[in-house]
Each structure stands twice: as structure tokens, then as C-alpha cells.
Image: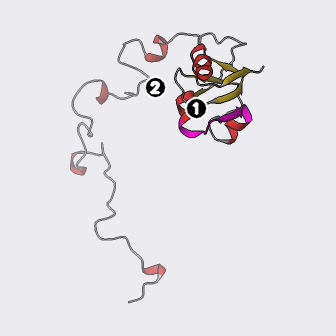
Amino acid sequence: MLQMLHTLRPARGAVSKRKRVARGNSAGGGTTAGRGTKGQQSRTGKGRNFGFEGGQTPLVRRQPKLGGFTPPRKVVKEIVNLDKMEELLDAGTYSVADLRRRGLVRSGRPVKILGNAVKKKFVLTVHAASKGAKKAVSEAGGSITIVR
């Protein structure tokens, strides 16, 4: 049978009347009104401050008042590992733009090469490189040029 909007009803038992506590024992929620017996939780005005930890010094107060110190001229570099380059790239000449195009570099930050073992001959032009990376690339027949 087709139902009309004005005939729709919730399923039987899906909707029940709310229990009105503290309205007398005959109503089923009298005496303690569902708060148990005695104790802080049973009293009126029982709410405590957000973050209250029972008298223990709260987490917010245990933290340092001020943050740390961030060096204003610190330069965060993006790291590229030689083993990743060897895995993803063929031997050849690569600049920062080439590494970005190939997906090894994602941000616009300066690029630093790290690692200490490589077999392919790479000629790289990057912002920085570790001593181990320079040595490994030169041993494989390549070179690393540092640009500012």
C-alpha cells in the first residue's frame, strides 16, 4: 500500500517518553534521582572546572609557561637520500628543478643531499650536501656543485 507523508509514523518502540527524574518516587526517579548515594557527584552544583584533575596540579599548569626558542635565521632544508636517487633515477646530471620535476623534492626549501653509498654516476647541483654524500658521489665518478 502506498504511504502518504501525513500517515508516516516511527517504528513501534523506536520513540519513548523521556524519564523525568527527581519528580517523586511514584514517577520512578525520586529519592536520589539517578545520582547514586552521597559523594561529590550527588551534590547540587557538582560541576567542576574543565581540566580539573582532582586536586593534582593540572596538565596545563605543569607545562612550561612560554614555548621554546626558535632561532630566527634557522634554515630548514629538504633532505634527499642518495639511495632513493639511485632507486628512482638514472645516472646523469640533475639540478634542484630536475629533482622537483621527478618528485624527489616537494617543497620550495633548499635541498640537501645525504647518504654514503652510491653506484651510479650523478652530477648534482644542489644547496647543500653531507661530507659522506660528496665522497660517495665522487667515488662513483660524479660530482656535487653547491649553489646558494
Rendered view: 22 above or below 140: below
How crowded is the residue under tag 1: few (<14 C-alpha within 10 Å), some, or many (20+)? many
Identify the mark nearer the N-term, 1 or 2. 2
Q: Nearer the viewer, residue 59 or 54?
A: 59
Q: Quadrant of residue 32?
A: top left
- Could you tell me how far apart the alpha carbons at marks 1 and 2 are, in whole angstroms? 60 Å
Whether tag 1 and tag 2 are in contact, CB under 8 A, the answer is: no
Q: Which residue is mark 1?
A: 120
Name the foreground residue: 141 vs 100. 141
Q: Position of residue 106 (x, y in %)?
A: 65, 36
Residue 67 locus on image (x, y percent): 59, 13
Give above or below for 103 relative to 117: below
Q: Is residue 85 magenta?
A: no
Q: Which mark is residue 2?
A: none
- The label shown at residue 50 is 2
Amino acid type, label 1: Lys
Where are the magenta residues, as a range?
87-97
What residue lies at 26% left-to-right and 40% top-to-bottom?
34
Front one among 21 and 3 = 3
Label 1 sits on a secondary structure element that is loop
Q: Amino acid at mark 2?
A: Phe
Quarter of the C terminus within the rendering: top right
Q: Is residue 45 left or right of residue 123?
A: left
- SS for dot 2: loop
